[in-house]
Image: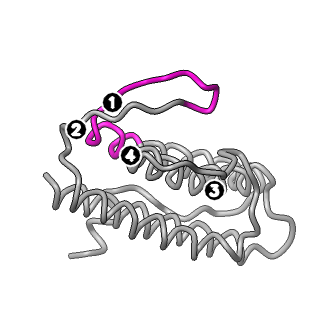
Amino acid sequence: MKEFFKELFEYTFHFNEIVVNSLQKIDGTIPEKAVQLINHTINAQEIWNARINEKPYRIDVWGIRPLDTLKEINEINYQNSLKIIDTFDFENKVTYTNTQGKAFSNTVRDMLFHTVNHSTYHRGQIATYCKLENIIPEVTDYIFYKRQQL
């Protein structure tokens, strides 16, 4: 299972980077919602990593950082997620508070899966916002990623 999760986070890292690159290459106005959502996606992974590690975090889940900083943050998030996969028992429960201050407890496995699923969901939203502005979005489907590896 750990190898599969490493693959999922490689996929997440790869397409987060592709989306950031594609937004940076837009000739004209970048859709504001797309910028908000890629920031949110990358910020959320940073927060989930911190929660699993039971570390404090200062990042605002909806905070906006310059696009040119997101690739480095994405790389750091990816490396931190891989460390979590390598060192944590997936069945270990972690208690944390959400952004509204409410306490929850989930397994590391569920928190990691949520992180990947959350990223996929928001990349789909980014594609929609780009299409609304007549910008052709990148294909970021998991199966497309797997086909590229063949």
Label 3, on which residue? Answer: 38
Label 1, on which residue? Answer: 106
Regarding mark 2 in the picture, which secondary structure is present there? loop
Which of the two discs, 2 and 1, labels the residue nearer the N terminus? 2
Say which of 7 and 79 sits in front. Answer: 79
Regarding mark 1 in the picture, which secondary structure is present there? strand
Dot 3 crowding, Cα within 10 Å, few <14, some 14–19, many 20+: many
Q: Label 3, label 2: how many angstroms apart (C-alpha)? A: 29 Å
Residue shown at 36% from the left, 26% from the top: 105
Residue 4 horizontal/vertical position (percent): 19, 57
Residue 84 horizontal/vertical position (percent): 30, 57
Could you say which disc has been placed on residue 24 in the image? Answer: none
Say which of 34 and 61 sits in front. Answer: 61
Could you say which disc has been placed on residue 92 in the image? Answer: 2
Question: Magenta region: which residues?
Answer: 98-114
Label 4, on which residue? Answer: 52
What's the amino acid at mark 1?
Asn
Residue shown at 66% from the left, 52% from the top: 59
What's the amino acid at mark 3?
Ile
Residue 109 forms part of the magenta stretch: yes
Which of the two discs, 3 and 2, labels the residue nearer the N terminus? 3
